[in-house]
Image: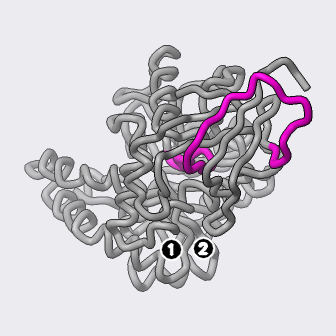
Amino acid sequence: MSDHAVLHVKGRILVGPEEVRDDLWIVDGRISYDRPAGARDIRTVVGWALPGLVDAHCHVGLGPHGPVPEDVAEKQALTDREAGTLLIRDAGSPSDTRWTDDREDLPKIIRAGRHIARTRRYIRGYAHEIEPDDLVAYVAQEARRGDGWVKLVGDWIDRDLGDLSAVWPRDALDAAIAEAHRLGARVTAHCFSADSLPDLVGAGIDCVEHATGLTEELIPLFVEHGVAIVPTLVNIATFPQLAAGGEDKFPRWSAHMRRLHERRYDTVRSAYDAGIPVYVGTDAGGTLPHGLVAAEVAELVTAGIPPVEALAATTWKARTWLGRPGLEEGAPADLVVYASDPRADVRVLADPQRVVLNGRVTA
C-alpha cells in the first residue's frame, strides 16, 4: 500500500440503479469493496455515491468564434468537474486538448476530433469545411486523431433554400462511415431537421446529436439500426431566440426552428418509448456555458423519461455505451457524492457534496 491516505465512502453506493452497497474504499486511486488491511490516515465521506457523471456532448476548447486558449479550456473543464461531470465525450473541437490527459484533476475526455462540415455550411471557425469528394479522407484523419469517435455536420441552413437541409450525398456517407468503422471509430452527426436522417442511418451512423427532426416515421429506422441519440435539450431551449434573430432574413428557417422547439419533449419521449438509447449531453462550449449536466438530466425528466432512466443516461448506461467503467472493483475512483438519493429526485444532481476524481477529493 502507498503512503496516500485511504478514502472511505460510506452511506449508499449506487453501483447500479438497483445494486446498492453500504461502502467502498479508495486505495491508490482505485475502488475496492474490501477494507484494506493496515489502512491508516483514513478519510471518510458520507452520502449517496454515483459514478462520475457523463456529458456525452460537450466541447472543451471551443468558444463562440472557434478555438480558445488553454487557460480558458482549463476553466471549462474545471467548471464541468465542479458540476460532477468526470467523463466527457467531446463532440467536436478545433482545439488540441491532449494536454488535459496529463492532468489528474481534470475530467477524462473522449474526443471526436474536429467537426467535419460542408463548405460554408456550419459555424465559422469550428469545422473542417470540405466537399464530398474529400469526406472519406477527412473522416479517416479525424478517426486517427480522436478517441474512437468522428463528428459530422449532417445538416445546416442552406441560404439559397432559406431552411435547414442535408449537406452530404448518400454515396459519400456510405464510403466515409464505412472507413470510420474500418478504423475502429464510431460516427455521430449534428442533425436538427429530418432531411438528413434516412441517409445517415442507412449509411450506418452510430449516433445522432440533437435529433430534433426525429419523426414517428423515422423512429422505427433508428430502432432497427440501433442508433442512439443525445438530445441536448438545454441547447434546444435556445431555438426561439435563434429563430427570432433570423426571422427577417430566413423566415422559413425560423418557423422550422420554432416547430422543432415546440415538439422537443414529445420527440424525446417518443424516441425513449420506442427503445432508442438516449444519453445526456449539454452542448457546452461555443455559446453555452459548461456545468449544465444536472439541468440536462432534469430536462429529460420533464420530457417524460423516468427519473432513474434519466439518471442512467448520465451514469451507468452512459459509461457502458462509451466503454468506461463505473463503480466497479479496481476501477479508477471517479465518483460524486450527494446528500440524498438522486433516484428519488434528480434535482439533487445540482448540489454535489463531494467530487472524487482519480481517488482524490477535488470539491
Residue at 56% from the left image edge and 62% from the top image edge = 312
Mark 2: secondary structure? helix
- The quadrant of the image that shows the N terminus is top right
Which corner quadrant of the image does residue 98 belong to?
top right
Considering only vertical position in the picture, is 36 above or below 276? above
Quick one: 158 or 34, which is closer to the camera? 34
Which corner quadrant of the image does residue 191 belong to?
bottom left
Read off the residue under disc 1. 198
Residue 306 percent coordinates (x, y): 44, 72
Left or right of 213, for residue 230: right
Read off the residue under disc 2. 202
Q: Amino acid at mark 2?
A: Gly
Which residues, given as a range, are shown in magenta?
Answer: 32-57
Which corner quadrant of the image does residue 79 belong to?
top left
Mark 1: secondary structure? helix
Of all residues shown, which one is farthest toward the left? Answer: 248
Considering only vertical position in the picture, is 51 above or below 284? below
Left or right of 99, for residue 92: left
Residue at 27% from the left image edge and 66% from the top image edge = 260
Tag 2 near tag 1, CB within 8 Å: yes
